[in-house]
Image (cartoon, coloured by chain):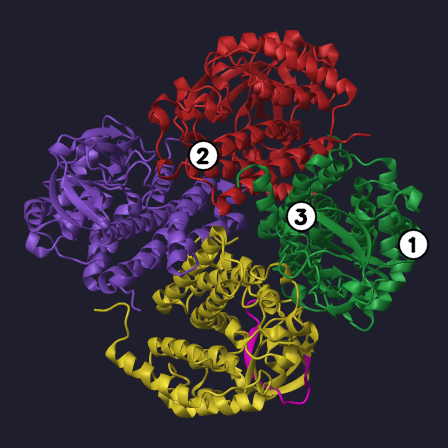
Chain colours: A purple, B green, C red, D yellow
Amino acid sequence: MDFSLTEEQMMLRDSARGFLGTEWPVPELRRMLDPGDAPKAANSLWGKIADLGWPGLLVAEDNGGLGLELFDLVVLMEETGRHLIPGTLHASGVLAALAVETLGNDGAKQRYLPDVAEGSLKATAGIYEPGSGWTAMMLRPQPDGAVTKRYVPEAADAGLILFVNRTSGNDVELAAVGDPEVTNLHSMDTTRPIYQVTCDPDSAERVGGGTIGDLQTVLDKAAIALSAEMVGAAARVLEMTVEYVKNRKQFGRSVGTFQAVQHKAADMLIGIEKARTACYYAAAVADEQPEKLGEAASIAKAAANSAFVFAAETGLQLHGGIGFTWEQDLHMYLKRAKASEFAYGDSKWHLDRIAHLLALG
Amino acid sequence: MDFSLTEEQMMLRDSARGFLGTEWPVPELRRMLDPGDAPKAANSLWGKIADLGWPGLLVAEDNGGLGLELFDLVVLMEETGRHLIPGTLHASGVLAALAVETLGNDGAKQRYLPDVAEGSLKATAGIYEPGSGWTAMMLRPQPDGAVTKRYVPEAADAGLILFVNRTSGNDVELAAVGDPEVTNLHSMDTTRPIYQVTCDPDSAERVGGGTIGDLQTVLDKAAIALSAEMVGAAARVLEMTVEYVKNRKQFGRSVGTFQAVQHKAADMLIGIEKARTACYYAAAVADEQPEKLGEAASIAKAAANSAFVFAAETGLQLHGGIGFTWEQDLHMYLKRAKASEFAYGDSKWHLDRIAHLLALG
Amino acid sequence: MSRLQDTPAELVFRERLREWLADHAPAIAKHDVQALKTWQKELYEGGWLGLTWPSEYGGQGLGFREQVIFNEESARAKVPPSVNSIGLMIAGPTLIAVGSEKQKKRYLKPMLTAEEIWCQGFSEPNAGSDLAALQTRAVSDGDDYIVTGQKIWTSNSLISDYIWLLVRTDTEAPRHQGITALIVDMHSPGVSVKPLRQMTGEAEFGEVFFDEVRVPKSNRVGAENDGWIIGMKTFTRERANISVSLSVRLQQQFDRLLESVRGRNIPLDPQQAREVAQAYVDSECLTMTCERLAERLFGFESSVVKVAWAEMNQRLQEMGLSTLGPDAPLLPGGGFDDADDSATWGTETLSDGVESFAKSWQFGYLRSRANTIEGGTSEILRSVIAERVLGLPRK
Amino acid sequence: MSRLQDTPAELVFRERLREWLADHAPAIAKHDVQALKTWQKELYEGGWLGLTWPSEYGGQGLGFREQVIFNEESARAKVPPSVNSIGLMIAGPTLIAVGSEKQKKRYLKPMLTAEEIWCQGFSEPNAGSDLAALQTRAVSDGDDYIVTGQKIWTSNSLISDYIWLLVRTDTEAPRHQGITALIVDMHSPGVSVKPLRQMTGEAEFGEVFFDEVRVPKSNRVGAENDGWIIGMKTFTRERANISVSLSVRLQQQFDRLLESVRGRNIPLDPQQAREVAQAYVDSECLTMTCERLAERLFGFESSVVKVAWAEMNQRLQEMGLSTLGPDAPLLPGGGFDDADDSATWGTETLSDGVESFAKSWQFGYLRSRANTIEGGTSEILRSVIAERVLGLPRK
């Protein structure tokens, strides 16, 4: 195995870090805490992100994108995770773009992907349903009634909402939703609002289709991208914590000299390094060995869940009381950690899947 | 609730601690590591224990015992656990005595209990069977063939081996075994050998009977007594560890000043205090509210499992390399911890039972 | 003897109390301070407050068992918590132990009747775990001290009449030896309070600023520069009282969890069932351990219970959150902004309806992250256990 | 580029090796030292040892990838482990880094051929985690040192020809500055070895005693009093090599676990299945992290992997033991006494038949308790990670 970054990937990483450090500093991020100001802050960043071509990173060159691989995306996502950027990039450039690339018919690709890649169209996709949990096989065909999708990211702000609906057996369709009814579900992570969307089937348009397996591929890749963001965010929490405990003095010494603090910081690092590896591996699998994608994605998400939740909770503990305040930034990472943990499957769900793949069911 | 000890109980505890400190010091205990010498060492202690009346603690006064309650036994067992005494007291004075008291007919009580209480008869009981796990309901009636019992404590040295056999439905019989075939199962804990015993049904004598529920009462009380021994042993490991880390110097200071060491020792204490409470509670329940015995016994065993295994493993870690040697005494506690953890139900088994009682099944 | 059941006298007490609560317990919104004060006064007049306090100061002169019964029964009746909890659980008991006769006569009874609400001013921005680093100064000026400085994490500071304050009276002495305990009127000129918003959205704590506040020396508790030991006694009392009340709180949280898992559509798998069973084992062991160690809880043993409780409550909240599955991160009622208003007490069960953030698992999860920090971080308390209970050497 | 597959050159190497091992790999009992030496020599002559060592000292001059492939393939072929592991994994690589040209020429090749077996003498009874407290003295006497003292936890000491030794050459200097590294002939007069029995019953380690042992100064590695830094380099190499070989060991243990749970009569419940899945997640992440961090493993990052590996292996062994249910504490084959004789390598799977203690989960469980102590306690290594990798301040 070779997980070293290519020169291009290192450039992508460094330029992303530089860009976000300048264009999305903490005061900008904190605007996301104010429901009135959040959409403006997110939009302002989005314009600049679009200029960099990130929304089209996974979109094929023929469709106006950069045509890069998931491994490249993972490198970028570590950086966007560090800075807790809003959800449009993942919703539009990852989830919706993958849905169209994987399930869309040629017309849909031509119609949507260039605008998605350019960032002029913000898309999102609704997949899960009330009662489906995180299991695509639990989606239910809805022959007559209105389809309701839960956990749809960034729906209020999207120019295109796609639904993946089960039609019958193992078949799914991709539908472009018209006239949606959008309800804010009030995620704990206010930087990434999620919604329930109900669509009147009469105003939806079928723009593609495929199998449940194709849908699972989309979900797995989206989960890997999210896992990489989680690793990046966890690494940032560790940095913030190291910085804080170095400088915070109690009992006449730096708090960072206490073994209890040191050892927790070490455990944060161990979890992060393992999860980072898992993300790189999963991305490489997606690019090279698609038959192992499910297992690799589940390993990555399970590892990222543990690493990020542990880092956020522990980082908060090591900050003491100040970490618990609204003024400090850590709570945004904790809320992102919990919101991410329960997106695309919690650890139990992924472990059950791995157990199934290991024939332990 | 009132878990304070009566004056009699404090005397019992103090005298037991004094007696075992004198009569069962570490060099005697270490004789149990030598397969040739172990039976002699155990026998020598047994004579003195019999003189104190401990084997008859639970036996009714009418049958020659002290007629005390389980709470008294638990107080004593904490002390016998501290000193890792051999298994005869638990096998004969607890398990077998309870089996006869609970399931024996009048003849059996008169025939066996006075000698068991006096210590002149060492009894034991075989209950579990290959394939039964720890679940009494999994015992199978064996109408014709020879009955085989697994995990029979101290069988090689017993003057009386009792079997509890399921006969039909919820009924069990108590049988005195003649001409047993005894095989050493080589427990990791060499201070407490356990055996497989096969009995030719023609040479067994029925000496009592009852229900599976009665049998479960015997098992629950035996588990509570063992849990108390585990708490005592865990507390002793903590003492040994505190003593060691106080005196061991590294980096120019006592190892006990390091936070990593201090915090692990604190966690050992927390586990022990919780498990001690659980044992006292379970004993009080056995004496006063038998309808809650199952739940209380499972709480006690689950808590004792966690506390003792954690204490033994952590104590060993805090001793560093020296704790890993045969010469040091800690490994005897670790082996007792693991052997005890898997006697009368591991934690999963007890948690499943509690979940069932909480109607979570 | 029965170890598990009330004595006849205890049973009488319990039944009388249960009846009284059934007749009197009110429904009060969380921030209706005046109603809460009235309710506390009613409780006091019913004879149910200051149960263990000496009768000469307005207490009932009863024992620890009665306090436990009170806690159990008021939880069962779902009465609102005390508006003057810092006074009743921390300042009052410490004052009884170390205050002058005059101070006890003056302050204890209005604490019980809620006529005077108390808060506690120990922590400072640079003196958290390391309390001895506190810098709030008190300079002698005739019969008064002039107090200047800042306290933080002060619960109830916005509604308090008095603050139980530690200040530095000697800047030259070794840091543990220059500290003094004062009772300060929160209405004195120069005292100001700023709410401190937490990550839950609530402002449960405040920052208290002292700008040349004049405090009569008669309000000093104990001798000058003798405040460290008083602070330590306050801490053990704080932890002891957290311990005593936690039994009830843990059991309430466990009951919520049970209801939450039973109320789901999906049956529990064996692991989830075992996790709940393990939580039951731990919460039963812990609450009973409080009772078993009751007499030692005013010593360092209180740390044993505090550490275990904090981590147990965190686990319960995490489990509760997990029962919600994909809905786990979604804030009922919209979350942070209206947390303050619609909330009642966070002890409601599902059958009360999950209407608001403040009674949700989401709020519980976020709030519980502070459990291992407030009242002594778990790191500090584990060292206290190691050094003070187990006798390991200090640095 | 492919990130997951061998390059064409690597593939050739792997296939050639696999074929060679299929033809040559022997079955050897654990304590047949002579047969093990012969096997190592054969391996060397096949061109499979010293893969990353410079060719001028008898190595193959290849890269890290080839070493990984060698580890994977020899695990797959279940070859016996190296009889000279301390030489190949610790003493040799350190000597390459810090030894003199003459020393490298003299010692490296016989290490590879197993003509000379090595052990490592660092730990002492009062210098475990705190290596700088070592007291074994080396007094200058003309062209020699006279060495007196005791080492402990010395693997392979009973069969070794040389020991890689740290001694104190200056008792006046600050403790890190008076230490020197020596190569000592184990057959020198005054060297004696006593086996050290562990709680598994085995005597895997020894105590080595030095009673005025004469050591030529030409056997000194580096400058006098310059041994501390050499010791540190030895440690990172030790941990790096543990890390490199652990991938294979973890995967073998995980495979044993899989076979063990699948071989039971009772189907797994979801919790047990999830525990196995979690172990799979952790072991996959860890072994791949070794490869990802390969270049940094000769620095302090090796501690990351060592800590995680030790706790992972302990967990695997506990899980394996638990799969046995009520039989968990029962020693196959009778246990401690015959552990030494019937044992082979502890890597066998159930299909080889669990005949003896040394290949059992019971042995694995007991042995694994030392994993968090040997090669640096997890406590020390977490501090190393915090201070050296994360940059937290030292005391």
In contact (CB < 8 Å): disc 1 and disc 2: no
Residue named by callout 3: B169
Nearer to the camera, B59 or D26 = B59
Give the letter of the chain under mark 3: B
Q: Nearer the viewer, residue C205 or C143?
A: C205
Mark 2 and mark 3: Cα distance apart in space:
48 Å
**Residue C314 on the magenta segment:** no
Q: Which residue is mark 1?
A: B115
Label 1 and label 2: CA atoms lie apart by 59 Å
Q: Amino acid at mark 1?
A: Asp
Query: Mark 2 belongs to which amino acid?
Result: Tyr
Vertical side of B210 occupied by C70: above or below: above
Q: Position of residue C345 (x, y in %)?
A: 49, 21
For mark 2, name the chain: C
Labels 1, 2: front one: 1
> Magenta segment, which residues?
D173-194
Tag shown at residue C149: none
Q: Residue furthest front?
A: B144
Give the quadrant of residue D371: bottom right
Give, as a three-letter code, the residue at label 3. Answer: Gly
> For the residue carrying disc 2, how many other residues have a C-alpha within 10 Å: few (<14), some (14-19), or many (20+)?
many
> In the depicted view, which residue is nearer to us: B58 or D277?
B58
Say which of D303 and C136 sits in front: D303
